[in-house]
Image (cartoon, helix red, strand yellow):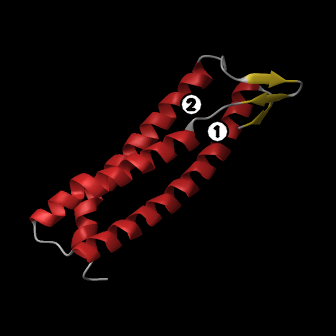
Amino acid sequence: MNKLMPYFRLMKKSIILIIVITLSIVITNDGKEILTGFKHSVFENVHLIFNSGIYSTTALLMFIYGIYLSYKKFNVAMNIKADRKSYIKASIITMIGIGVVFSIFTVLWSLILKFVVEAVSGKNALV
C-alpha cells in the first residue's frame, strides 16, 4: 500500500474537484426545480413525482473522471517515471472508492430531497 501512496496523492486534488463539481451541479439543478414551483414535476392524486438528475449526473461525471484519470493523469504519472501497474492499481482503487462514496451520496441526497420536497409542497413525494 505504501507503494501506491504517491499515486493517491497525485489524484487527490482531482478527486476533490470532481466531488465539488458534482455537488454544485446537483444542488443547482434540484434547487432550481424546487424554487420554480415544480414545473417539470408530475402531480398524481396525492403524490408529487419529483425527477432528480443526481443519478445521471454522477454517472456522467464518474465516466468523465475515468477518462481524465486514464488520459491526463496517466501522462503526468509516466512523466515522473511511475510504475504502470501500481498506477493502474491505484486508479482502480480510487474509482471503486469514489463509486462507493457517490452511491452513498446519491441515496442520502435522495432522502434529503424527499423530505425537502414534502416540506415545500405539502404533498407526499416520490423522488
Q: Point out residue 5 in the picture as x, y percentages from the top left corner.
A: 26, 75
Up the image or down, 122 lies above or below 77; here it is above
Q: Are marks 2 and 1 in contact (CB under 8 Å)?
A: yes
The quarter of the image holding the C terminus is: top right
Residue drawn at point x = 50 percent, y = 35 percent: 27
Up the image or down, 67 lies above or below 119; here it is below
Q: Residue furthest left?
A: 80
Specify the quadrant of the image occupied by residue 123: top right
Q: Point out residue 53 in the picture as x, y percentages from the top left corner.
A: 57, 35
**Please, what is the three-letter code of the amino acid marked with disc 1?**
Leu
How many labels were placed on the picture? 2
Residue drawn at point x = 57 percent, y = 43 percent: 55
Give the CA distance from mark 2 to mark 1: 8 Å
> From the viewer's perspective, is 48 left or right of 12?
right
Residue drawn at point x = 28 percent, y = 60 percent: 12
First reached walking from the N terminus: tag 2 or tag 1: 2
Mark 1 lies on a secondary structure that is: helix
Residue drawn at point x = 42 percent, y = 62 percent: 95
Mark 2 lies on a secondary structure that is: helix
Up the image or down, 86 lies above or below 20; here it is below
**Please, what is the three-letter code of the amino acid marked with disc 2?**
Asp
Q: Point out residue 103 in the picture as x, y percentages from the top left corner.
A: 56, 55
Q: Residues within 10 Å of mark 2 (few under 14, many from 20)?
A: some
The quarter of the image holding the N terminus is: bottom left
Q: Residues within 10 Å of mark 1 (few under 14, many from 20)?
A: many
Residue 113 image label: 1
Up the image or down, 46 lies above or below 21; here it is above
Q: Point out residue 61 in the picture as x, y percentages from the top left corner.
A: 43, 45
User: Label 2: which residue?
Assistant: 30
